[in-house]
Image (cartoon, rainbow, N blue to C red):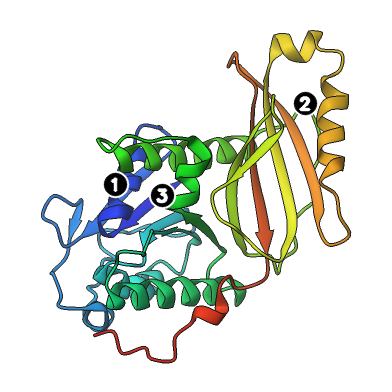
Amino acid sequence: MKIIGLGSAGCNIAKAFGKFPQYDTYGIDADKEADITIMKRAGHEEYDDRFPNLKRKLKFVGEEVYLVLCGAGKISGGVLRLLEQLKNNQITVLYIQPDVALASEIQKKQEKIVRNVLQEYARSGLIDAVWLLDNQMVEKGIGDVPILGYYEVLNQAIVNTVHMINVFRNSEPVLGSFIEPSQLSRIATIGIVDVEKEEEKWFYDLTGVRDVVYYYGINEDELATNGVLFKTITNYVKSKVNDNTNLSYGVFQTTYEQKYCYCIKYSSMVQSYAELLDDQDIS
């Protein structure tokens, strides 16, 4: 799998994926330390107008690609040009929504526009999916985070969760019943479940949810000796059932001592659509 980071936040997350051998990572930024350095531009529209051709450096076709970015930065203006160059691949965008409370008005506009445009791309099938991740909710999910290494901790939480979901999606469960999400449900988020407390911690407040999938990771000894595990898991999943949402789950054998549960939910609805601004002059 290919991981491409666009901009500083995207590059840092792409680099964090590099600890796993399953991924080839590429960082694109105006910073000279990036894997692929592009010319610095004055604003969002200029990155869109003058984004370079990177096909010689990103020369792969038919690959599963995760493109990671945050929309608040100027360089995110080039994302549609980059997607055009990657169109012959299976593309999922990991969109990092920052805390924009202290951002400038221009940054707020950039972030809202990029986030909504990418969701429309997913709904129309121009990309396979967009996974929305809110840094504030990631922090809430993992608990108190110190100032030193703050973003590294959040990035690792995102990377570890995405990686484990990928591992489970490409493994055979020892038990489970999966329902394929609707083809219309291309907007998603991910999260974790505290198995002991039965508490869900989602990384984005997704609305209009149509499908939810739970991936349980349980060690061999627990699978062999815990006589109430099946009932516990199925009762929990059943407790989340409602008329509007399809739920499914799988149980996978792991070598970890602790029980894990990762989850993903899907929607066909553009999130925060009402925030799309009429004034889109962000140059």
Earlier in the chain: of badge 3 and badge 1, it is: 3
Q: Residues within 10 Å of mark 3 (few under 14, many from 20)?
A: many
Nearest to the observer: residue 15 or residue 278: 278
User: Is residue 193 visible in the rendered structure shown here?
Assistant: yes
Between the C-alphas of marks 2 and 1, the distance is 35 Å
Return the mark for residue 133. Answer: none
**Residue at 25%, 84% in the rendered image:** 49
- Residue lying at the far left of the rendered structure: 32
What residue is shown with label 1?
A: 12
* Amino acid on which disc 1 is placed: Asn
Q: Residues within 10 Å of mark 1 (few under 14, many from 20)?
A: many
* Amino acid on which disc 2 is placed: Val
- Locate the C terminus and report the quarter of the image it occupies: bottom left
Earlier in the chain: of badge 2 and badge 1, it is: 1
| Element carrying mark 2 | loop
Above or below residue 55? Residue 217 is above
